[in-house]
Image (tube, helix red, strand yellow):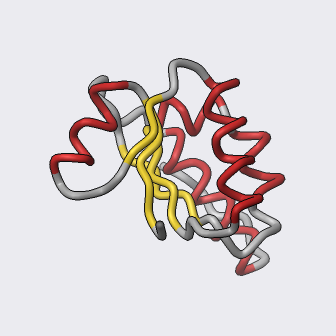
Amino acid sequence: MSIIALGDEFFVTNFRLAGVPGLVVTNEVEARNKIEELIKEGKCKIVVISESMAIKLKKDREKWRERVYPIFAIVPGLEGPKGERLHELYFLVSQAVGVKLKLE
């Protein structure tokens, strides 16, 4: 499996309807454990998670970022975008170019 959706029942069901396999998790501990399993298996290239779950797993994702895979595709959940991902992207771009960007 090269792509998988990970999240609550509603989140995963939407991706399953689009043909993406998914794993239902109820909290960040379950999500962390499932992602660790996927990393050990080495078969998953992309993990789709909600923005709210991404926020909860931020420190773990920083640790996992050292690996080539999996790549995390972060999408807004039912509650809509939180803006946290935008701040994270600004930080990464600032780090890449060596200049602190100003977010307005």
Picture layout, residue 10 above or below residue 67: above
Q: Nearer the viewer, residue 62 or 39?
A: 39
Q: Residue furthest top?
A: 26
Q: Is residue 77 left or right of residue 30?
A: left
Picture layout, residue 103 above or below residue 56: below
Percent across and percent down for residue 42 are 69, 68
Where, by quadrant of the figure, is residue 100 drawn?
A: bottom right
**Which residue is at a point 45% across and 39% down the rendered structure image?**
23
**Which residue is at a point 54% across and 32% down the rendered structure image?**
53
**Which residue is at a point 22% across and 58% down the rendered structure image?**
19
**Which residue is at a point 61% across and 33% down the rendered structure image?**
31
Percent across and percent down for residue 30 are 64, 27
Q: Is residue 93 left or right of residue 5?
A: right
Q: Residue furthest bottom?
A: 97
Q: Nearer the viewer, residue 71 or 13?
A: 13
Q: Is residue 67 left or right of residue 90?
A: right
Picture layout, residue 28 above or below residue 76: above
Q: Nearer the viewer, residue 79 or 39?
A: 39
Q: Is residue 78 left or right of residue 82?
A: left
Percent across and percent down for residue 90 are 59, 59
Q: What is the number of callouts on the image? A: 0
